[in-house]
Image (cartoon, rainbow, N blue to C red):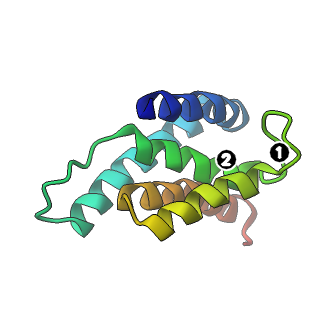
Amino acid sequence: MHLFFNLLFIWQLGSDLEFELGRKKYRLLVLFIIIGTGLTTFIVQFGSSIPNIGSSAFAFGIMGAYTFLFPDMYILNVKIKIRYILLVFFLLEILAFTQIAHIIGFILGYLFLRIDIVRKFGEL
């Protein structure tokens, strides 16, 4: 069930991101999230027996990027903006501190687009 919901988030939110960013930039986003979360988690949890590979960190990275790019979008006809729904997911991860990779993934997904916007427009 856990894997199903990860893949559902990746498919649903990722397809919108790929359409908006284009295939090349979306692939760079995917690589940035996967490599970034893998390396950062390895450094933070050095010597741990917890595996660093999983779809959850990538799903959270997609959530972070989606929150940045489409903050005012509504999802599933719910009258709550997506930024609030996804930020609740993020805050629950911080409060529970279940997986550092989830938190890192969300931050990296958000930062990838934030850095790109800064480079493109020259302002924050």
Is residue 88 shown left or right of residue 82? Answer: left
Residue 120, quarter of picture: bottom right
The residue lying furthest to the right in this view is: 79
Q: Which comes sooner in the sequence, label 1 or label 2?
A: 2
The label on residue 73 is 1
Q: Nearer the viewer, residue 101 or 88?
A: 88
**Whole-percent x, y for residue 29 in the image:** 52, 44
Please tell me the numbered disc located at residue 66: 2
Quarter of the image for the N terminus: give it: top left
Q: Is 77 or 117 nearer to us in this picture?
A: 77
Please name the amino acid that badge 1 sits on: Met
Residue 4 higher or lower than 123, as above or below:
above
Q: How many marks?
A: 2
Q: Residue 124 placed where, x, y %?
A: 72, 72
Left or right? Give the position of 105 relative to 71.
left
The residue at 38%/60% (across/down) is 98
Q: Position of residue 119 (x, y in %)?
A: 65, 62
| Crowd around label 2: few <14 · some 14–19 · many ≥20 (10 Å) | many
- Rounded to the nearest angstrom, the CA distance separating label 1 from label 2 is 9 Å
Report the residue at 64% width, 61% height from top: 114
Answer left or right for 3 relative to 51: right
